[in-house]
Image (cartoon, helix red, strand yellow):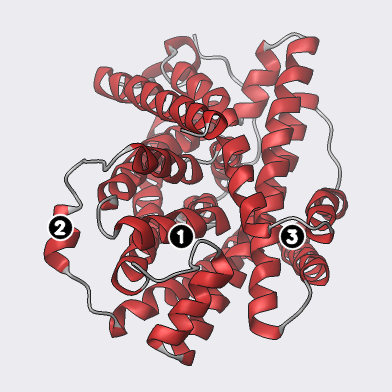
Amino acid sequence: MIEQPVLTPVRPERKLVRLLGPAFVAAIAYVDPGNIAANVSAGAGYQYLLVWVLVAADAVAVVVQYLSAKLGLVTGRSLPELLGDRLPRAGRLAYWAQAELVAAATDVAEVIGGAIALGILFGIPLPLGGLIVGVVSIGILAVQSRYGQHTFELVVIGLLAIIAVGFVAGLFVSTIDWGDAAAGLVPQFAGTPTVLLAASMLGATVMPHAVYLHSSLARDRHGFDPDPSRIRRLLRATRWDVSIALVIAGSVNIALLLLAAANLHGVPDVDTIEGAQAAIYRTLGPAVGITFAVGILASGLASTSVGCYAGATIMSGLLRARIPLVVRRALTLIPGLVILSLDVDPTRALVLSQVLLSMGIPFAIIPLAWLTSRRRLMGVFTNTRTLRITAVAVAIAIVTLNVVLLYLTFTGR
């Protein structure tokens, strides 16, 4: 028997295209400043060698985000809510603590990325840039609070378009070796540093906060109705939503790697976002350099807004407590501003935040695979045998790669 939640209002059916949107919000996590740093480093250091990592990461992301949305649509509950229902009080608090720490690390990385972009574009000091990013993100979140989720989705899609233009534009004036790029689709490494970099790229791609959030986004956007025919229609729309959104996000990530491979390989001082942008500015000209910096800024603004939204979803589901998004945004801005005010390399802080993020991935992926495979919870929509095997394989692969990432990071090998 399926565990039925309290029904929420169901919105009228619309054309398939009108059902798209939630996955584009979740997809912002796949083009955040952490991804920029990892992908540029991969291209600048090893050219096309790790193209296959991004292709594999995007395929994994499609599976994970579809399962998350499916969980919300079929059960009417978000992943944090379902976990909160099943954990004792002490377990809920501990689980919330790790999830909140992950959300905070996400926010720090994204505020830093936005502040770096403002520094590049306007010479604004990093602490002031971080404050500006926070204020603008409050405005973006206010759109969601006042005008609803669909309008918020449109704003985020607009920022995603700016990100795509900012990072893809340089390809049109670059000389890409497409033969070598195609060879990069073959899984291979070139020593321990590339293993570490590949694990970092995967860790920066599958973000735990996006997994928690998507189940809530899909449910809140469409409401809950146990009618199997409506759920099937929504799941069909979700497959398109996830596929389109993540193909765009994956293409942007690959474009970043190709851009760095064609223009930054062997160039000194490109191990920071500022250094990479400066090199692109010198190599491809001011227009491309400025467009790239605008893409970084849009990435920071969009991802920090979505990260704050995810944190609110986690708190609501696990602690059964709500605070206004704007208030939460003001509070979670503090750690990023503190780091920017200290004498800390911002790019290094960004990279370390990705390591912390990797620690939280198993806590999101494993329960998701388990819950979506439970017939009592999912009924006729439980994962098929093929999808169960795929979900388990994805969970094992992600956990293994992140263990490798943590081991290599802390041992310095």
Measuring from the top left, give residue 124's x and y in whole percent: 76, 79
Numbered label attached to residue 222: none
- In the rendered structure, the answer to whether residue 152 lies left or right of residue 225 reads right
Of the residues tagged 3 and 2, which is closer to the observer? 2
Disc 3 and disc 1: Cα gap in Å?
22 Å
Q: Residues within 10 Å of mark 3 (few under 14, many from 20)?
A: many
Instruction: Work out which residue is located at the far bottom of the displayed protein and give it.
Output: 286
* 323 or 381, nearer to the observer: 323
Discs 1/2, front: 2
Toward which corner of the image does residue 393 lie, by quadrant? top left
Which callout, 1 or 2, points at the residue further toward the start of the chain? 1
Dividing the picture into quadrants, the one containing residue 92 is top right
Q: Is residue 155 left or right of residue 255?
A: right
Q: Secondary structure under badge 3?
A: helix
For label 2, the residue is: 182
- The percent coordinates of residue 254 (x first, y second) are 33, 60
How far apart are the alpha carbons under marks 1 and 2? 36 Å
Which quadrant of the view contains residue 102?
top right
Residue 18 is tagged as 1
User: Which amino acid, by three-letter code, is at mark 3?
Assistant: Leu
Amino acid type at circle 2 is: Ala
Under mark 1, the amino acid is Arg
- Label 3, on which residue? 141
- The answer for how far apart the CA atoms under marks 3 and 2 are is 41 Å
Residue 383, compared with residue 110, is above or below; it is above
Q: Name the mark nearer the viewer: 3 or 1.
A: 3
Q: Secondary structure at mark 1?
A: helix
Residue at 68% x, 31% y: name it.
99
